Amino acid sequence: MATPLKVNRIGLEPQVYKGGKTTLCAGCGHNAISERIIDAFYEMGIDPKRVIKLSGIGCSSKSPAYFLGGSHGFNAVHGRMPSVGTGAMLANQKLIAIGVSGDGDTGAIGIGQFVHLMRRNLPIIYIIEDNGCYGLTKGQFSPTADLGSKLKTGVVNDLPPIDTCALAVELGATFVARSFSGDKKQLLSLLKAALAHRGTVMLDVISPCVTFNDHEGSTKSYAYVKEHDDPVEEVSFVPFFEDISVDYEPGSMQEVTMHDGSRLFLKKLEEAYDPTDKINAMKRLHETARRGEFATGLIYIEPDRDDFLTQLNVVDEPLAKLPLERVRPGREALEEIMEGLR
Amino acid sequence: MSPTDLAVQEQQASRNQQRVVNDFSIQIATVNGSGSQTANMVLLRSILLMGVPVSGKNMFPSNIAGLPTWYTIRASKRNYIARKKEVDFLVAMNPETAKEDVLTLEPGAAVVYDEPLKLNALRNDLVFYPVPFDALVKPVCPDAKLRRLVRNMIYDGILAKMLGIDLGLMEKALGKQLGKKAKAVTLNAGALKAGWDYAESTFTKQDPFFVEPMNETAGKILIEGNAAAAIGCMLAGVTVVAWYPITPSSSLCESLITYMKKYRIDKATGKATFAIVQAEDEIASLGMVIGASWAGARSMTATAGPGISLMGEFAGLAYYAETPAVIFDVQRVGPSTGLPTRTAQGDLVQAAFLSHGDTKHIMLMPSSVEECYTMAMEAFDIAEQFQTPVFVMMDLDLGMNNWMSDGFKYPEKPINRGKLLTAEKLKQLGEWGRYKDVDGDGIAYRTIPGDGLPVYFTRGSGHNAKGQYSERPDDYVENMDRLARKFETARGFVPKPEVDTVAGAKIGFIGYGTSHWAIGESRDQLREETDVKTSYLRVRAYPFNDELASFIDAHERVYVIEQNRDAQLLQLMKLEQTPDRQKKLRSVLHYNGLPIDARSITDDVLAQEGFEVAKKTVRTAGSSAGMTGGE
């Protein structure tokens, strides 16, 4: 008898969740993120046919070709993926949208669309693969580069960085997290939690550029990030379809119930942290940044706010699939309008 | 005084001796924000209710309150609804412009004015009717705060009396305009009557202008092109709309919101069968439209020139990745911010080739409010059938002015969603490629996220017939050639021109959009005044159809009439016509921000034809229609 194949809860093999072969540099943080995305979608048992992958332009934006080969993808124009994703989700709210952007694609050319995406709470997982530089154009600084960070050429960044997490919290995103491409466990838990959230997920993943920004003097190198990673809590995720009871000492853990019934267990580290407190979240982000460190983990969550489609009060069925009789008013409607104009 | 001036005066004097019935224009000069729009609409509709063909054009500043605005109403027994160059009857309410407004009138014109302005001292060749508006408004509007708004209705009463408009019909028009606002109706009806009574007891008719009942407007509606297009979008089954406010297109989406809230709410659930989003800018608007179309929704945006400029990059993506999009361009005067509240046809070349690389787009060009309605529906079908952006080229004159029209007909055909792959079709094809031309028309089958059919990766980067990333020269050329083939398929498919061939005419006219109305009137002028016969081809879409070449061949000289400086329609034609045909093409251009008028066309054509054209000293009505230095 053949060994039964490993499948997930909807009967699909891991293979189904893979994409094309990556063309990014060996060791690029983005590849590790693609692998975690594959794991998360497999483990959560998401049907790839329901997923849309979106991106802008840059190294990061190439990566949707390297995961979920069975999903539709849209590699849009530089910095404008949020609007394309917004349109797609308005057309069909049954889709699951994952967008991959970079720090230049988001923080520079795309900052306007990023800002308004965060405000709307559109259901989308928005990942920034953040390496502090433009890889595809050979290593220029991006707006998330830290003050004093040095390029290979010796050029020092003298402009303050944009903290995409602080910005997202400020703008009203309902799920804001930061992780590190090298932290498999944390990143996977956050991605699975992202799939359980209904609303905008902003996930900034520090993802070192091995070719242009992994040297001494860079604050986005593997070595620097490992050294300065400062998790706000330890994240464990229990999906809605797993009935696992978690025992914990009162006061040592915060439990958050997600939109789909999944649960997040946030284990407190030395300093207490409540990710549902917006002001506290901003404070922690600023304090950590002042120390030259990165606050990682679930920074902020608001699980219950209405998403954009609910606010727009659209019908439950995908707008794209409504039959003609539901989208073309009858003759009497036109006649009524005409009569009003006579 | 030149001999020409004398000629004009003589002509004018002789005109004064006879009644001028249903053939004149009224210009009302007010300050914007003073509520004159209601009074103007009531006047317009009352003439329509008299059965007389009528048109109204608003010349307003880019400002909310306090700057000069002019509204021109033309009554025309011959159904001429283009702007008339000359003003016959002026209502001077704005102290700032009154003097210039009066000085630019033709002799013999009539002026109703606010008495304290003492305009009668300016000229002795006009008919003056001074009206003490402030004194008249007091007794009919005890609330001093409302007087500013009610005051304008008095000139409607004066005009009704002086021109012979039925006061009952004017009251009916007032009721239509104000609807259920009973208090406002009462107040305004009082002002109307006060104006009528004052005119009756004070003035002796000295001007020759009369409105007399006709039977030409039964069943007609009055509607702005923007609202007409909105109705078309709703009946086309649009589901996702993204827009950014910009004059003169905002009212298209705002009308659409009003209609959709009324007619597109699901009865069972109270939920919307649409999503309308005010985006952060025009770039995001088109991005949302592209995303929505890609995911299978009928989607649109509306904008003006500056928005079109911003949409360039996305327009190229939609062209190359082949996603449908419907984009209304309600054109205004450019370049740059230009004259935001004035009309032009200046975006034609930009829209035709919008974006970098070899890009070309389908454009539809409505001339009437009825075509705004029908072409809105056609635009969605064409965008989906050709999987490409379709630009609907309107202009401010069409979009924001009220036009008389027959009622719109309900669409008899179902919508056409183009080549969507089905399981059955897939079986028949065997192998599917997103950009594979299986039918030879350049149009491939597409799948939609969530439809369960084969997926593909949509991208603006180079791709092969299967939609895979490719930088191969042969893949690139094959794809670009197929896109060109698709455009050629569209040539035979988009709305055909309307051609009126006149036997023996050596001259052909070509125009599009709102120029149509002035062109028709100009052709009559040429025939009746100078015995010059003309044929006419009205372009309704780009790419041009084959009829264009045969029309040029059939005439010795062809005048391309349009509302921009650089002869944009003519330039587009030159790109695809033979040198012999190009030699025949001449230009008539109008680009001062005011809607084109027949007399300007006639004079220009006659001059180019070598006729001695008497250059009238009369300045264009509304030549003063624009303030200066008021930033």
Image: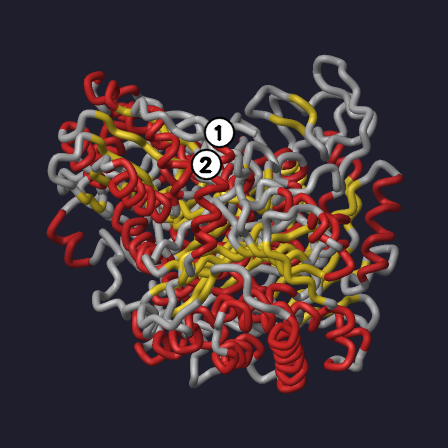
Residue occupying the point 56% across, 74% down: A243
Residue B20: quarter of image: bottom left
The chain that hosts pointer 1 is B
Rendered-image quadrant of the N terminus of chain B: top right
Residue occupying the point 75% across, 55% down: B118
Q: Nearer the viewer, residue B387 or A179?
A: B387
Q: Nearer the viewer, residue B499 or B468?
A: B499
**Secondary structure under the numbered disc 1 in the rendered image:** helix
Residue occupying the point 88% across, 46% down: A287
Residue A242: quarter of image: bottom right
Q: Is residue B69 left or right of residue A309?
A: right
Identify the disc placed on residue B7. Answer: 2
**Secondary structure under the numbered disc 2 in the rendered image:** helix
Q: Residues within 10 Å of mark 1 (few under 14, many from 20)?
A: few
The chain that hosts pointer 2 is B
Identify the disc placed on residue B504. Answer: none
Q: Residue furthest top?
A: A153
Is mark 2 in CB contact (under 8 Å) with mark 1? yes
Q: Nearer the viewer, residue A15 or B32?
A: B32
* Rendering coords of residue B67 (x, y %): 71, 51
Q: Residues within 10 Å of mark 2 (few under 14, many from 20)?
A: few
Residue B43, relative to residue B125: is it above or below? below
The scheme the figure's colours follow is secondary structure
Q: Which residue is mark 1?
A: B3
